[in-house]
Amino acid sequence: MRHLLNPLDFKVDEIDHLLNLAHDIEEHREKYAHVCAGKKLATLFYEPSTRTRLSFEAAMLNLGGSILGFSSADSSSAAKGESVADTIRVISCYADICAMRHPKEGAPLVASQFSTIPVINAGDGGHQHPTQTLTDLLTIKSLKGRLDNLTIGLCGDLKFGRTVHSLINALVRYSNIHFVLISPQELKIPEYVREKLINTQGVTFTEVSNLDEALPQLDILYMTRVQKERFFNEEDYIRLKDSYILTKEKMKLAKDDMYILHPLPRVNEISVEVDKDPRAAYFRQAQYGVYVRMALIMTLLEVDKPC
Ligand code: NCD
């Protein structure tokens, strides 16, 4: 039995296989409509979510399976003091696979140690978010036709943004990747992520604070929200929240084939006027999230690809 806790749990060729499966699902939706009939997905969400939870549920329903779960810690027995370990033991009796989001780093890992069903990390604190990364990889591959030879700008809250940490983890394994890390001093990537970048051969990166200067060289701009819920005090959040705002004017500095990605939700960091730009790919990205989660559920449940 396999879990997905970190993008590194899948080898590069397994990720390629998964992205190809997601692509086939996109092209031939009807072929996959019943492959998970009789299977149940539990979504255990101890933290707010719109896209991740609903795209998991849509994915399972698209495969002909069923769903159950809770969408906040308050509505589960966590509010009575139940441990993640006990909850997952019980959920293992009710469902065939589960997706867990939790504010504590490592909670899905703990769950996987007590679970008898595959556990998918749907975001653990400021740590990792591997299924967002699969979504991001599928989006980049679909739009640019490749996952190597890219200059990727990551902009905003690189400290607390778990989608950024997971995406770096996954992309360092492809060749000739250059990262431009764009953030205020206080929101730079954590040391463990920087070490990974330093210690991986063939990967280069620069850390800057100015978005305008970085824009002209980028193939992908990955914007992120300042993660309000992870700040220790509101003053710092208020000071940093509008560090970057991508506008129509700024987009004149970018290449014609540079795509903008964002895991969403967006707050102020991309002005709504940019949505009409053909390079704005964040809503398409949300759609890719369903296909890739369908492919992931099939893979972890060892469901064969239909002919
Ligand atoms: C992200 C998350 O939860 O980390 N959202 C998502 O899953 N698409 C990004 C964020 O909340 O800023």
Image (tube, helix red, strand yellow):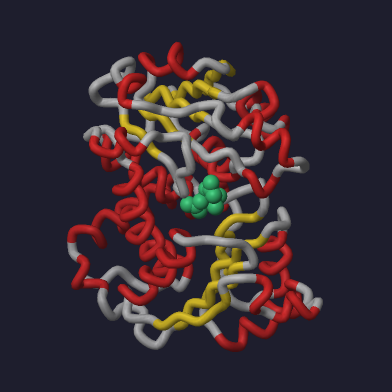
Q: Is 101 located above or below residue 187 in the figure?
A: below
Residue sitting nearer the eye, 180 or 169: 180
Residue sitting nearer the eye, 221 or 228: 228
Tell me which residue sits at (65%, 55%) in the image: 124
Position of residue 262 measured from the top left corner of the image (x, y, whole percent): 43, 41
Position of residue 65 measured from the top left corner of the image (x, y, whole percent): 38, 81
**Residue farthest top in this picture:** 213
Tell me which residue sits at (57%, 64%) in the image: 3
Tell me which residue sits at (71%, 33%) in the image: 236
Residue sitting nearer the eye, 14 or 256: 256
Q: Is 148 located above or below residue 121 in the figure?
A: above
Residue 234 location, quadrant: top right
- Residue 232 visible in the picture: yes
- Residue 130 visible in the picture: no
Tell me which residue sits at (39%, 74%) in the image: 60
Position of residue 68 measured from the top left corner of the image (x, y, whole percent): 50, 82
Residue 117 location, quadrant: bottom right
Q: Is 27 located above or below residue 270 in the figure?
A: below
Instruction: Give the mark count.
Output: 0
Position of residue 103 measured from the top left corner of the image (x, y, whole percent): 69, 57
* Residue 288 horizontal side relative to residue 225, left or right: left
Rendered-image quadrant of the C terminus: bottom left
* Residue 166 horizontal side relative to residue 284, left or right: right
